[in-house]
Amino acid sequence: MNRDISPRLRFPPWAGRNFRLLAASAFVTGLGASGAVVASAFAVLHVGGSGTDIGLVAAARTVPLVVFLLIGGAVADRLPRHRVMVAANCLNAISQGLFAALVLTGRAEIWHMAVLSALGGTGQAFFAPANEGMLLSTVDSAHAGRAFAVFRLGVNGANVGGAALAGALVALAGPGWVLALDAACFAVAAGLRSLLRVSPAALRDTAGRHGGGLLRDLRDGWREFASRRWLWGIVVQFSVVNAVITASEAVYGPLVARENLGGAGPWGAALAAFGVGNLLGGLLMLRWRPRRILLAGVLCVFPFSLPAAALALALPVPLLACAMLLAGVSIEVFGVNWMMALHQEIPEDKLSRVAAYDWFGSVSMMPIGTALAGPAAGAFGLYGALWGCAGLTVLLTGAVLTLPEVRRLRRQDDPEAGRTVARGGQPSDGQPSGRQPSDGRPTGGQPTPKEPSGGIGEGTASLS
C-alpha cells in the first residue's frame, strides 16, 4: 500500500488563507522597502546632493501621503480593500522601477527623485488604510495578539535581511540595484494580494452600506476618531515622534555614517540591528499579554529616543547597534499593543477610515520634519539637532501618560476590563468583539457595544 508520508505544513486555526497571504506579501514588500530607505538616501548623495536634498526627497514622498490619506481611507471602506491594495502596489512598482532605471543609467536628478517619490507616496496613501483594515478584519478576537505578533515578526524579519543586504549592495554595486529590487518586490506583492478572497456577501455589504458620498464617510470616520481621547492623544504624540525619528534615520543617520561610521555598510548594519530588535520584540509579544495594553505600549516609546541619542554622541557602531536593537524591541511591543487596541475598540466597517485618520495625524508632520532637518542641522549643528529629536520623544511620551484612558485601557479578555474606562470616557464591558473576518468566517463571541458614531485611528500607523 502506498502511503503519503511527506510532511505537511500545518498552520494554526487562526492563520487562515487571507492572513497567510497578507503576511507573505508584507514580508516581500518589507524586504524591498527596508533596503530602499538606505538606497534612496545614498542615491541623492551619489549625484552630489546634500542633507537638505535628502530631506526634500523624503518629504516629496510624504506630502502626497498626507494629502490623499483621508480619501484613501474612505475609498478602502467603500471598495473591496484587496483591490485597492493591488492597485496601489502596482503604482509603487512602476514608480520605483523608473527611479531605479534613472539611477542605474546615470540620468537621475534630484527633481526626478522627488517626483517619483511623490508617486510612491500617493500609492501608499491608498494602500495603508486598506491594508490595515483588511488585516484587522481578518483576525478573530481570541487570537488577535498572537496573530499581530506573528505578522509583524515576518515583516521585521524581512527588514533585517533587507537592511543588511541593502548596505552591502549599495557599497558594492550602487543604490540603483537596491531600488530595482524594491520595485520587483512590489510587483510580487501585488500578485499575492490579488489572490485574497472576500466573500460575495462581504462585497455586497461593502457596496451597500455607503450611500452618502465620500464627505459623509469622512465625517463618520472623524467622529469615530475624535470621540476617543486615548486615540487622538497618542496620534498627536506620534505626529511629532514620527517626524523626528524619520529625520534621524533618513537624513541625520546617513550623514553621521558618512562622517564617523564608515559609510553605507555600517549604517545598514545598524538598521539591521533595529530589525533584530523588532524580531525579539515580536517573540516577546507571542508570550507576553499585558493587561493594560496602552500603558505597556506607551511606556515602550521612551526607548525610541535611544538611536538619536547614540548618533548625537557619535558612538561606535557596536554601541549604536545596541541602541537600535533596544528601540526595535520597544517599537514592536508598542505596535502589537496598539493594533490590539484598534482591533477591540473600532467597528469593522470603519476600520479603514479610522486607520486613515491615524495615518494622517501620524505622518502630517513628517514632510516638515524631513524638509527642516537640513536647516535645523545648520542652525543647531548636526549633533544638537539629534539631541533635540531625542528630547522631544521623551517629553511627548511623558505627556501622553497623563491621560487616564491610556493608563487604564485593558485587554477585553482581562477579568477586570469591565471596570476600565475605554472609549470616550465610557466603561468597556470587556467582551469579545465578534468581528467578522473579511473572508466571511464567523469568529464567535458576543458583540461589544460600540458607541454611536463618535472615535479613533501609526505616528502609530507608520510603525504598523
Image: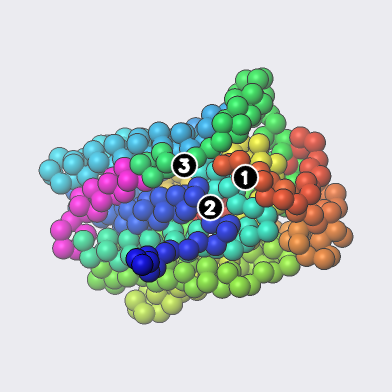
Magenta part, dominant SS = helix
For mark 3, what is the residue?
Answer: 196
Query: In the rendered structure, are the residues bearing label 2 and label 1 in contact, judged by CB atoms less than 8 Å apart?
Result: yes
Residue 254 percent location from the top left of the image: 32, 61
Query: In the rendered structure, are the residues bearing label 2 and label 3 in contact, judged by CB atoms less than 8 Å apart?
Result: no
Classify residue 163 by image quadrant: bottom left
- The three-letter code of the residue at mark 1 reads Arg
Of all residues shown, which one is farthest toward the front?
Answer: 1
Mark 1 residue crowding within 10 angstroms, few (<14) / some (14–19) / many (20+): few
For mark 1, what is the residue?
Answer: 441
- The three-letter code of the residue at mark 2 reads Gly
The boundaries of the magenta stretch are 170-189
Please indicate whether residue 415 sits to the left or right of residue 15 in the image. right
Please indicate whether residue 63 sits to the left or right of residue 74 in the image. left
For mark 2, what is the residue?
Answer: 16
Residue 442 percent location from the top left of the image: 66, 46
Identify which residue is drawn at 36% across, 67% down: 1
Query: In the rendered structure, are the residues bearing label 1 and label 3 in contact, judged by CB atoms less than 8 Å apart?
Result: no
Q: CA distance from mark 2 to mark 1?
A: 10 Å
Identify which residue is drawn at 82% across, 66% down: 415
Labels 1 and 3: the sequence-earlier one? 3
- The three-letter code of the residue at mark 3 reads Leu
Labels 2 and 1: the sequence-earlier one? 2
Whether 250 is among the magenta residues is no
Relative to the observer, which residue lies in front, 105 or 284?
284
Identify which residue is drawn at 51% across, 43% down: 131
Relative to the observer, which residue lies in front, 376 or 32?
32
